[in-house]
Amino acid sequence: MKHVFISSSSRDREVVQRMVRQLEGRGIVCWMAPRDVPPGANFGAAITEAIEAAYAMVLVFSANANLNAEEIKKEIVLASQANLVVVPARIENLVPSDRAFRYELSTRQWVDLFDNWDHGVDRLAAHLERVKPGAAPAPGAASPPASPSSRPTTIPLPSRRWLMAGAGAATVVAAAAGAWVAGLVEGEASVGGLWHSDFGPVTLVQRGTRVTGAWQQQHGIGQIHDGTFDAASRKLEFAYTQTWNQANGRAELTLSPDGRTLDGTWRQHSTMGSHTGRWLMTR
């Protein structure tokens, strides 16, 4: 039986398992690693065979997928070779910074799950049923009414300026397209999305006043947690950790009136002592 291949970051396992349970509860057969890799099977071969036997791929997109993209990019290539329908499902409100992701997904339709989960899963399931081999629309059948938060949309992506960071050569977004920026700062101020900084690309995920995220630099990935954003004062404060030097720190930044810049200071304690400095992010 043809199935839907689920491509995701292992760090999002709990959220992905929840999504798969709901899809399978609607009669959509899913294949996901490591759950469906046969005992003793070669992991890479099992994934390749599963993609070749699928009729669609759901790419679960998140900050983790954005920053740890190598395996997912291989799966996207295999899906393209197998002529699969690829449906990106966002579980966080952000767009790709990785160049290969942006190329592959710039014209595809997204389904958002992060704001209205159940409605988003309904939309995703309805779309997968429509592309299923041999599926025919029932007379008079209609998809669930789209809400602004879960309607499939083509996400405008950032422009293609790149910064080569020494031997690490990390590619990051240097400026956002005008329509994308306008959408982020329209109405109440928001800091969610992708940012460029001297420390590498930064992904911020905002839910209400709470902010989490991560950034990638030559030494590894830093984690942002316990963040809060006050839209009235435009102040962002968060704690962060860096595994490569066992650092713990805090940052206090201010969002510019046009929503394009976060500027402030950081301070941290690590194995190399205590330090402070400036942290400037732009989009």
Image: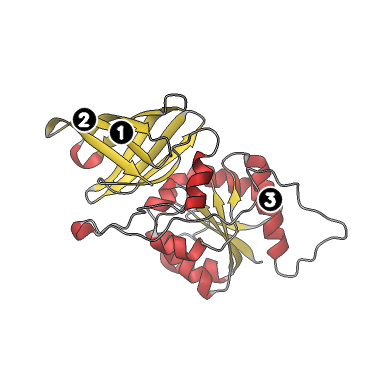
Q: Residue reaching furthest left?
A: 272
Q: Quadrant of the N terminus?
A: bottom right
202 above or below 172?
above
- Residue 68 seen: yes
Kindly identify the residue that appears in the image at 56 percent across and 41 percent down.
114
What residue is rendered at 55% in x and 46% in y? 17
Residue under circle 3? 123
Q: Secondary structure at mark 2?
A: strand
Amino acid type, residue under disc 2 in the picture: Gln
- Specify the label residue 268 is tagged with: 2
Q: CA distance from mark 2 to mark 3?
A: 44 Å
Percent position of residue 89, x then y: 56, 52
Name which residue type carries label 1: Tyr
Res. 4 image quadrant = bottom right
Q: In this rendered view, identify the residue nearer to me: 105 or 37.
A: 105
Q: CA distance from mark 1 to mark 2?
A: 9 Å
Q: Nearer the viewer, residue 46 or 250?
A: 250
Q: CA distance from mark 3 to mark 1?
A: 35 Å
* Circle nearer the N terminus (1, 2): 1
**For mark 1, what is the residue?**
240
Q: Are marks 1 and 2 in contact (CB under 8 Å)?
A: yes
